[in-house]
Image: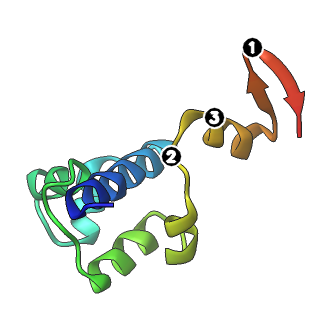
Amino acid sequence: MADKEKLKRIGMKLRVLRAMLQMTAETVAACLSMTRQGYDKVERGETKLDFEQMGIVCDCLKVSMDDFRDFDPSPDAIREKLFGKKKVEGKDLGK
């Protein structure tokens, strides 16, 4: 995966986790001591966070770095994580 794609995927994960926790971008930006505009660039995949910053943002989002790495931000994965169910073509398949 190219660096641009990785940055965009990391940004998407951050945005989805933040939204799931009902946190604002301003809150996460404050954890990182950056502006909201600067943090918006992170979520858009335009700015890279270093290892220390990733640790800070994971703490802010109350997720371990390992869980962040393994987090799948797709709607189906989130639905399964939240409700423990898989759906295929509108049919509930259970676990």
Residue 46 on image: x %, y %: 13, 55
What separation in Å lies between label 2 and label 3 (alpha carbons)? Answer: 8 Å
Q: Nearer the viewer, residue 55 or 23?
A: 55
Of pointers 3 and 1, the one earlier in the residue sequence: 3
SS of the residue under disc 1: loop
Query: In this figure, which residue is indicated by the disc labeled 2?
Result: 73
> How far apart are labels 3 and 1 at the CA level?
11 Å
Determine the residue located farthest toward the top in the rendered image.
Answer: 90
* Crowd class of label 1 (few under 14; some 14 to 19; many from 20; radius 10 Å): few
Kindly tell me whether residue 59 is visible in this rendering: yes
Question: What residue would you read off at disc 1?
Answer: 90
Where is residue 53 drawn, in percent x and y?
Answer: 27, 78
Marks 1 and 2, how far apart at CA: 20 Å
Disc 1, disc 2: CB below 8 Å? Answer: no
Pick the quarter of the image with the N terminus. bottom left
x, y percentage for residue 50?
Answer: 23, 80
- How many residues crowd mark 3 within 10 Å: few (<14), some (14–19), many (20+)? some
Residue 50 lies, with reference to residue 37, above or below; the image says: below
Quadrant holding the C terminus: top right
What residue is disc 3 on? 76
- Residue at 55%, 75% (x, y): give it: 66
Q: Which of 68 and 39 is in front in this view?
A: 68
Q: Which amino acid does label 2 sit on?
A: Pro
Instruction: Count residues near mark 2 (Cα–Cα under 10 Å), then give few for <14, some for 14-19, many for 20+.
Output: some
Residue at point 74% right, 14% down? 90
Mark 2 lies on a secondary structure that is loop
